[in-house]
Amino acid sequence: MKKSDIAFIILFTLMAGFLGGIYVSSLQKPETKVLARFVNGEREVVTYLPAVDTKGNGVVGILKTTVKPGKGGVSVDVSNVLSYLDTQQSAKIAADVARNYTGIDTSNLDINYAIEVNATAVEGTSAGAAMAVSVIAALQSKTLNSSVFMTGTIEPDGSIGRVGAIVEKARAAKDAGATMFLVPKGQATSTELKRQRECRNVGFINYCEVTYKQQSANITGIAGISVVEVRNVGDAARHMVVEK
């Protein structure tokens, strides 16, 4: 075989390997995170927040989440919300969870949450899960189903934590027009102490004994709304996030 032929074969093999590498790499998902592009404005996502006031009454507030070009800031505008520092911390965790979930770098964006509620005061950390899902929707240029409400804290790993007053919140959600209420895992049932009185005759004496036994009830039946448990933001997003 001539030297020129050998050189041609070597060159052909190298070129084929190079082009093949380009083709294979084009099929692989890039490891670098995508930058969201907000060139001409901002995105706003609105959802509703079932909560309880200081008297234990169920109320529904509004969460407005705005994402716009910026420098990676996270802020919260609240009125009538207890534990502002806890709410601010939940907001930051929610933004981090949304970034990790979508794979979108938010270092060039500012995220603002505005919570509005017509009540004496509400506790704000139970809005954490809704905050995370609202940012996910905004980053993906989507919106949220207005008939699905949610309550739950948000954890750094994306899991949704337990909260209180589920029954009161479920009833408030139904009264506000929701058809589905998302709750943390294990909180779709309510456990109550039921009073039981049993009497029997002991000789000439009527002896009565009062006991209290735990009884579980399905909150869907109690509040009249579909109550669905969600373990993490992925579960919640599948129920809430919709195309515009």
Image (spheres, rainbow, N blue to C red):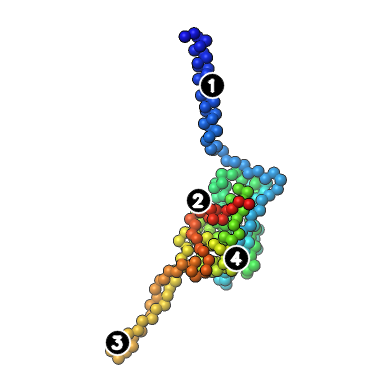
- Residue highlighted by disc 4: 177
Q: What is the number of the mark on residue 15? A: 1
Q: What is the number of the mark on residue 191? A: none
- Depth order, front residue of 97/229: 229
The residues tagged by marks 4 and 1 sit, at their Cα atoms, a distance apart of 63 Å
The residues tagged by marks 2 and 4 sit, at their Cα atoms, a distance apart of 31 Å
Pointers 1 and 3 in contact (CB under 8 A)?
Answer: no
- Depth order, front residue of 110/35: 35
Q: What is the number of the mark on residue 202? A: 3
Q: Earlier in the sequence, mark 2 or mark 3?
A: 2
Q: How busy is the neighbourhood of tag 1: few (under 14 within 10 Å), some, or many (20 plus)? A: few
Q: Earlier in the sequence, mark 4 or mark 3?
A: 4
Q: Earlier in the sequence, mark 4 or mark 1?
A: 1
Q: Amino acid at mark 4?
A: Gly
Of badges 2 and 1, nearer the viewer stands: 1
- Residue highlighted by disc 2: 157
Q: Amino acid at mark 2?
A: Asp
Q: Earlier in the sequence, mark 1 or mark 3?
A: 1
Q: Residue at x 52, y 28 (%)?
A: 21
Q: Is residue 71 visible?
A: no
Residue 60: quarter of image:
bottom right
Q: Earlier in the sequence, mark 2 or mark 4?
A: 2
The secondary element bearing badge 1 is classed as helix
Pointers 4 and 3 in contact (CB under 8 A)?
Answer: no
The secondary element bearing badge 4 is classed as loop
The residues tagged by marks 4 and 3 sit, at their Cα atoms, a distance apart of 55 Å
Of badges 4 and 3, nearer the viewer stands: 4
